[in-house]
Image: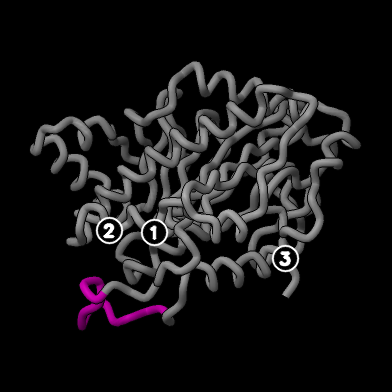
Amino acid sequence: MSLVPSVDLRDFTSGDSERKEKFIKEIGKAFEEIGFVALSGHFLSEALVDDLYSEIKQFFSLPQDVKDSYEIEGIGGQRGYTSFGKEHAKGRKEGDLKEFWHFGQYVKENPRLAAEYPDNVTVKELPQFNSIGKETYKMLEKTAKYVLRALAIHLDLEETYFDDYIKNGNSILRPIHYPPITSEPKNAVRAAAHGDINLITLLMGAHGRGLQVMNHKGEWVDAIARPDQVMINVGDMLSRLTNNKLKSTIHRVINPPKELWGTSRYSIPFFMHPISEMSLNCLENCIDAEHPKGFEDTSAGEFLHERLIELGLIKS
């Protein structure tokens, strides 16, 4: 059973002030207590989700040398393909048992950011792959914008506080393939215990058992969403900004029981990042005598760079 609370974004967007207030209270409470919610009423259609899964399964089924041709050197895996076992969690040497793809931002009206971000990589073998990836990216970005508006109100900020920071932000859509496990892993798991770097993460594909969240007692609990829900969690950037009022919860993807080793698992997180200039200095209204300032001042860009080094994706 999943112990993650459920919320419905349609309450927030309904135009009904009581329903809107209900959503803000529910998501605020969940993010202060466990840092995760299962959200329905998002902007992903069932058809789009089905199409995306079809495309990513086809991509990860391509011959390894074809996939390897989309692994771009020198950009820290920010776009295109990252092969099996390359990424590891902070503080671990073992590579996670996964391969993945990155879709990045589609910059509008900002030549400086268009030059700063790497270009998205086009898969020649699959004519629909990139257009379906882009549409999914846009719908998850739109969903995340409304979630952050609710959190802004919960934090006594202007409702649109985050809007300019996330417009053209450095967000990433990451389809992941956890291949079948063929032999006893020594220490590796599908994704070792970690916190996310970004503001919030929206996860498609948390429908089967595998994702686990650490509660405040240090216990691992299963996080399972209904098929019509996406799982959303607080990342380290939002935790820093709010002086840990909103919790960035440690989570992991465990290996399946031995009888399911022969099966693949797919999941698709959307990591909502702001533009690199966003200040992550603790908000004044999240600091008081009982909650002294817990983090050094930094920007989103500086923090991301530091964490990518820790993850082994870029060299210091």
Disc 2: CA contacts within 10 A as few (<14), some (14-19) or many (>=20): some
- Residue type, mark 2 in image: Tyr
Q: Is residue 287 magenta?
A: yes
The residue carrying mark 2 is 161
> Closest to the observer: 246 or 150?
150
Q: Circle 3 — which element?
A: loop
Image height check: is 160 above or below 131? below
Residues drawn in magenta: 284-295
Q: Where in the figure is residue 157, as x and y percent of width and height?
A: 20, 61
The quadrant the N terminus occupies is top left
The residue carrying mark 3 is 314
Image height check: is 270 above or below 243? above
Q: Is residue 20 visible?
A: yes
Q: Are marks 2 and 1 in contact (CB under 8 Å)?
A: yes
The residue carrying mark 1 is 165
Residue 70 lies in quadrant: top right
Farthest right residue in view = 65
Left or right: where 182 falls relative to 196: right
